[in-house]
């Protein structure tokens, strides 16, 4: 990392997103550091999920650029890549605010679908797999091993053969993270991973994210409302309000930032300036 | 809160206190019956010697309405008293089930069945009574159905042409026809059941396959066995061609556009006189050969094997061709389900957005499903052409698409055995009950309504995971998405 530092894992550069007359994100810039947990916070409707959708290719930003930097120095322009290439080429995976598992498929199948592209190549684009080529069988065994590894990490091995839709809510959240990890990403984007979790599950999630960062060299971008989670595990926090960045910094800086407090308390803009003046004075 | 609401709702439907409420309810039912019956039953046209006359049947309608009124009234009045009886029946049911499993359950039944079967067959041998032989097969069939319906159906299909009483008429119009629809159902099952893409124009690929064989054979003199793969490839090609612009649509829109595509193919076939012969169709399509042996009176299959010539040989040969084609469809589908492409199809049916986030190329995956389904449709079409010897656009109407889709939906989307049984029931049932043509549609409609009430997800709902760490658990139909295109 010293001589050839590949730089931040993600650069969001003056990204804007308009839906008709509505400006959801307005010229937003921030970077997510390599091996860091970066949190994107803000009140409801601040445009956090829109930013996520721009990064992961579900929306095409109206303006600006989003770049992912690979460890080998390659740079992927996420803002103009087709949606499915972002996971495949840029190694960016995501989870969803309202969990999107394949409910009618088993837990293991969910994790194998995540390894689709690798298995597809191994199966000779189906032709080889149809006749049971040994190389494909080996690839499938490896895929199952990877799936098992992540099931162990999230503590769901015993549910591997059950329908994903049958799992309790907290397990589904963890399964979605495991599924995203089975794509072997370098950047994992989590949209409110702690939503609906009880305090114990939330604590387990913190530990899981921290261990994933440590052991897999993973960078994480996180949207979260649970400030307990955000303040405890984030290295860097970006605060959005009405599509604009209002603050950025380390958790302890954000915690005491008056603009952030004002945004969360729902104070009018003029009052924010007033609050800021008061604090400066 | 929700529980009490549900309970009070239940109470409202189950217990109707007071004669007044019961009569009012029965009156409403009678009025509904009247309005339903009036347009259907009241007037009938009767052919006279010189003209067509309209006959009214008001008395019958009124009798029907009265019957509905009385029946509903009786039901309303008796229902509260019946609940005790139903509880008692349910109690007896559980007792019987406990007793059944206490006595060893199905294992005992199998034992008894085997003893009965052996006994019957010995008795049949001794007394030369054919009915006892049949009795011997019966328990075996029941036992196999419990164990593995797939193998039972396969065994029955293999021996069907040689079964006692299988005349040429039955093999051709029952056996072959059912198998064509089994194959079409399995082909469409890939598109609708696995990938969740609602295709109302599947018959287009059936037509492409049929015309591909007919025209290739007529214009270039190619044999059936060369044309069969070509027909499949051409149909798959058309599947891709159609899929490319269409698959960006979803749900209802996709259904409508595929329906339109089916019609376009048919209308092109009608109007492209110079190539397809228009509404007159293509006739004189060559029959398939068995390694060069033709099925004809002189110097053909029968002569080569020194058999007495009968036209049944050709029919039986055709039967085994379509059986092999259908089994090929089944084998490929079952394999594909366990391959990444099959899992991607099912994942697509479950959640397209999640698929995209995992790096699956949604368009390509849909196209492969469309093309694979179309290919099997094309195979079936080529077989249809060679079986009939004559094809015309009339065989490829929307009605065919609707029947194939109904087979898939009734059988249970994604279930191979369900689709096979549904084809047997729907197509076979139609053929067996041909004499009762007037009431066939009525029975069919009732069966559909019954299905929707009791088995809304088809005969065989749910799926078994394609891979398991330990023991695979069947996943209930309620968890499985139907797909939204």
Image: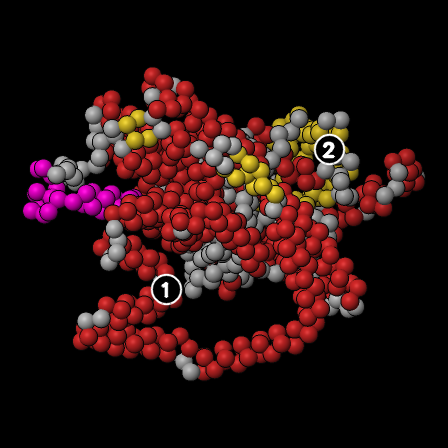
What segment carries the magenta color? B298-325
Q: Is residue B390 magenta?
A: no
Report which residue position mark 2 lands on.
A24
Report which residue position mark 1 lands on.
B145
Which chain's residue wears label 2? A
Q: Is residue B322 magenta?
A: yes
The label shown at residue B45 is: none
The secondary element bearing badge 2 is classed as strand
**Labelled pair 2, 1 in contact (Cβ < 8 Å):** no
**Compared with residue A160, is residue B172 higher up or lower down, i.e. above or below?**
above
**Compared with residue B105, is residue A89 higher up or lower down, i.e. above or below?**
above
Q: CA distance from mark 2 to mark 1?
A: 60 Å
Q: Main secondary structure of the magenta part?
A: helix
Q: Residue at x 28, y 73 (%)?
A: B117
Q: Is B67 in front, or is B307? A: B67
- Left or right for A89, reference A14: left
Q: Is B350 in front, or is A222? A: B350
């Amino acid at each position: 990392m010293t001589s050839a530092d590949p730089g931040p894992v993600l650069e969001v550069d003056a990204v804007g997103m308009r839906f008709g007359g509505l400006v959801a994100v307005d010229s937003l810039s921030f970077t997510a550091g390599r091996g860091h947990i970066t949190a994107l916070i803000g009140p409801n409707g601040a445009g956090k999920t829109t930013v996520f959708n721009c990064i992961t290719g579900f929306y095409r930003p109206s303006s600006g650029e989003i770049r992912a930097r690979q460890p080998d120095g390659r740079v992927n322009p996420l803002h103009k890549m087709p949606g499915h290439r972002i996971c495949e080429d840029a190694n960016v995976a995501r989870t969803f605010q309202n969990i999107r598992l394949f409910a009618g498929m088993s837990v293991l199948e969910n994790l194998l679908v995540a390894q689709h592209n690798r298995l597809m190549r191994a199966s000779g684009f189906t032709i080889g797999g149809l006749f049971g080529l040994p190389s494909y069988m080996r690839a499938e065994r490896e895929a199952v091993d990877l799936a098992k590894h992540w099931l162990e990490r999230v503590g769901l091995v015993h549910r591997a053969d059950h329908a994903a839709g049958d799992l309790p809510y907290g397990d589904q959240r963890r399964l979605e993270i495991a599924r995203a990890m089975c794509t072997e990403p370098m950047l994992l984007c989590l949209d409110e991973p702690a939503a609906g979790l009880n305090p114990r599950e939330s604590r387990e999630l913190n530990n899981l994210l921290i261990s994933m960062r440590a052991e897999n060299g993973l960078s994480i971008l996180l949207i979260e409302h649970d400030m307990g989670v955000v303040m405890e595990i984030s290295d860097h926090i970006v605060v959005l309000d009405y599509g604009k960045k209002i603050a950025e910094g380390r958790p302890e800086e954000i915690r005491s930032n008056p603009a952030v407090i004002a945004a969360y308390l729902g104070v009018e803009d003029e009052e924010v300036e007033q609050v800021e003046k008061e604090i400066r004075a | 809160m929700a529980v009490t609401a549900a309970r009070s709702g239940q109470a409202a439907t189950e217990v109707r206190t007071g004669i007044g409420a019961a009569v009012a309810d029965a009156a409403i039912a009678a009025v509904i019956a009247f309005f339903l019956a009036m347009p259907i039953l009241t007037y009938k046209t009767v052919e006279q010697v010189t003209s067509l006359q309209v006959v009214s049947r008001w008395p019958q309608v009124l009798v029907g309405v009265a019957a509905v009124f009385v029946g509903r009234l009786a039901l309303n009045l008796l229902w509260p008293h019946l609940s005790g009886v139903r509880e008692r029946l349910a109690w007896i049911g559980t007792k019987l089930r406990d007793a059944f499993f206490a006595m060893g359950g199905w294992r005992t039944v199998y034992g008894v069945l085997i003893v009965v079967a052996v006994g019957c067959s010995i008795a049949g041998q001794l007394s030369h009574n054919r009915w006892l032989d049949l009795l011997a097969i019966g328990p075996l069939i029941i036992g196999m159905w419990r164990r593995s319906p797939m193998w039972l159906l396969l065994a029955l299909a293999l021996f069907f042409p040689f079964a006692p009483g299988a005349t040429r008429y039955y093999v051709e119009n029952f056996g072959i026809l059912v198998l064509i629809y089994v194959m079409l159902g399995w082909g469409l099952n890939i598109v609708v059941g696995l990938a969740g893409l609602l295709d109302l124009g599947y018959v287009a690929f059936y037509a492409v396959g049929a015309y591909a064989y007919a025209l290739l054979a007529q214009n270039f003199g190619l044999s059936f066995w060369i044309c069969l793969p070509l027909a499949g490839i051409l149909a798959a090609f058309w599947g891709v061609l159609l899929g490319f612009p269409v698959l960006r649509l979803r749900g209802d829109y996709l259904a409508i556009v595929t329906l339109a595509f089916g019609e376009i193919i048919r209308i092109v076939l009608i109007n492209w006189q110079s190539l397809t012969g228009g509404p007159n169709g293509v006739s004189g399509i060559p029959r398939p050969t068995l390694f060069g042996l033709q099925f004809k009176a002189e110097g053909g299959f029968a002569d080569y094997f020194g058999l007495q010539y009968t036209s049944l040989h050709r029919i039986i040969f055709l039967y085994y061709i379509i059986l092999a084609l259908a089994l090929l469809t089944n084998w490929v589908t079952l394999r594909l389900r366990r391959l990444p492409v099959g899992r991607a199809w099912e994942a697509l049916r479950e959640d397209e957005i999640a698929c995209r986030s995992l790096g699956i190329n949604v368009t390509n995956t849909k196209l492969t499903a469309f093309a694979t389904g179309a290919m099997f449709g094309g195979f079936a079409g080529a077989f249809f052409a060679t079986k009939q010897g004559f094809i015309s656009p009339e065989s490829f109407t929307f009605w065919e698409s609707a029947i194939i889709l109904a087979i898939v939906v009734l059988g249970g989307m994604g279930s191979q055995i369900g689709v096979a049984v549904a084809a047997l029931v729907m197509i076979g049932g139609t053929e067996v009950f041909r004499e009762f043509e007037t009431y066939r549609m009525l029975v069919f409609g009732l069966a559909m309504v019954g299905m929707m009430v009791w088995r809304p997800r088809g005969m065989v709902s749910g799926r078994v995971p394609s891979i398991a760490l330990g023991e695979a658990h069947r996943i209930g139909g309620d968890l499985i998405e139907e797909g939204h295109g």
